[in-house]
Image (spheres, grey):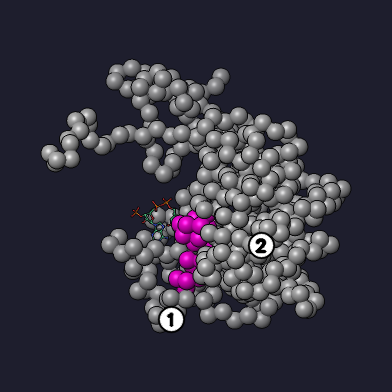
Amino acid sequence: MSEIAKIELDGTIYELPVVVGTENEKAVDISSLRGKSGYITLDRGFKNTGSCESAITFLDGEKGILRYRGYPIEQLAENASFLEVTYLILKGELPTKQELADFEGVIDNHTLVHEDMKRFFEAYPNKAHPMGILASMICSMSTFYPESQDPNRPKEAFELSINRLIAKFPTLAAMVYKNAVRHPFMYPKNDIGYVENFMFMTWGMPTEDYVPDPIISAALNKLLILHADHEQNCSASTVRIVGSSQANLYASISAGISALWGPLHGGANQAVIEMLEMIQNDGGDLDKWIAKAKDKNDSFRLMGFGHRVYKNFDPRATIIKKACDDILEQLGVKDPTLEIAKKLEEVALNDEYFKSRGLYPNVDFYSGIIYKAIGIPTEMFTVMFAMGRLPGWIAQWQEMLDNSEPIGRPRQVYVGATKRDFVPLDKR
Ligand code: CMC
């Protein structure tokens, strides 16, 4: 028999259904509560609210588990290619060899962006943040493919929009980089892999042959997989809620990019490196910065620490920390910020403030050190995160549509002025 939750309000008991997920996660379905009782629930920041039922990603914050479509992140990061994981996340199953080859072929067919898009770049000031440009470029794709704005188009047309987005995202991301360094744009090369093509368009030059370094492509492949989805986080929820108004795919993903930009979300990877460099330039006094992070009157937070869901460890951070050591060693890079990061982690993990609040390094704590070592400029870090998160955002958007979810529209508890009469200007 299915479980029922009971809630007593003003002396009346209301029965509410309990929903149980495949991993035994339990939720009280409160959607009928207001209709029955007049009450809504209040949950600032949605800390305890499930917004949907989803079959894409499972995570258990207490046990440090993360799985895409049932497959543990550790196994995927070790063995899969990013496009393989993209296929898995979008379609629910790992591709066969043929299915993967076909998918790669489709993506290769769409890597070129419209020539007119190049002209947009000329208008940005040279200090423009890459995330601002990226969000605009992705939204602009809807103007080049106006059919994407029709919510009633056939299924194949949706798939075409998705494939175009996956294919053109690295091209646009590389153009954002080239624009920042004022180097000529490189056209995509479609006989190399997805990651290698991004590297070619980023670091290749028209005047020389560029051969992607396999150490760097392997590192990028791993980082992209680790970022590929993370269930109902700030940007994924944004994508779902924007898409729930039937806004087109490109507009919805652009909104997700904007949400990711913030330093409490994906922008933390940039903020971490800036913090580590600041600590280093300040003389490296870790106790001072730990004390600042603990001081409630000080706005300083230890960036790359803490997570809404993970309270013991972030499995992505464990993989990245190890990868960081390996990659720096393979590339022969000595980065003093890595030493500071490790010492900072050690001090924080032994500090009662961080221990009692379940604050551990998250995915962004070490990722920036890898990006830096392989030559990605600091302001591009969050663009790399966005490229990794793309399949997750698309799958979340698609699932929301497939489930015919209603338009996202939370309620509120009004605490403003009660009714009062207008006072004409000359009487105020
Ligand atoms: N440094 C110092 N104190 C912290 C930190 C931190 N990084 N994170 C949380 N706390 C404290 C916070 O002050 C609060 O203390 P108290 O209970 O005394 O009021 C307690 O820990 C709980 O924090 P919270 O802000 O209520 O937790 P949240 O779930 O709302 O926020 C977070 C999660 C990730 C926004 C937060 O931990 C944070 O700001 N971390 C730094 C930014 C960061 O690294 N973000 C990347 C997240 S992982 C990448 C991704 O977005 O997917």
Magenta stretch, main secondary structure class:
helix
- Between residues 254 and 195, which one lies in front from this camera angle? 254
Residue drawn at point x = 62 percent, y = 74 percent = 182
Residue drawn at point x = 69 percent, y = 76 percent = 330
Query: Above or below — where is 179 with respect to 230?
Result: below
Image position, residue 107 (x, y; %):
77, 52
Callout 1 amino acid: Asn
Q: Please give the residue where the numbered disc 2 appears in the rendered image.
A: 118
Residue drawn at point x = 75 percent, y = 57 percent = 112
Image position, residue 27 (x, y; %):
50, 32
Say if the magenta span includes residue 274.
Answer: yes
Circles 1 and 2: CB distance less than 8 Å?
no
Whichever of callouts 1 and 2 sits on the residue coming sooner in the sequence is: 2
Residue drawn at point x = 19 percent, y = 30 percent = 421
Identify the image quadrant of residue 395: top right
Query: Above or below — where is 56 with respect to 128?
Result: above
- Between residues 320 and 417, which one lies in front from this camera angle? 417
- Please, what secondary structure does the residue beneath circle 1 have? helix
- Between residues 67 and 145, which one lies in front from this camera angle? 145
Identify the image quadrant of residue 201: bottom right
Q: Please give the residue where the numbered disc 1 appears in the rendered image.
A: 281
In the shown orientation, is residue 178 left or right of residue 107?
Answer: left
Mark 1 Cα shell of 10 Å, populated few (<14), some (14-19), many (≥20): few
Stretch of the chain drawn in magenta: 260-276
Q: Give the quadrant of the N terminus.
A: top right
Image position, residue 319 (x, y; %):
62, 61
Q: Would you say the beta carbon of the disc 2 residue lies within 8 angstroms of ligand 1? A: no
Q: Give the quadrant of the C terminus.
A: top left
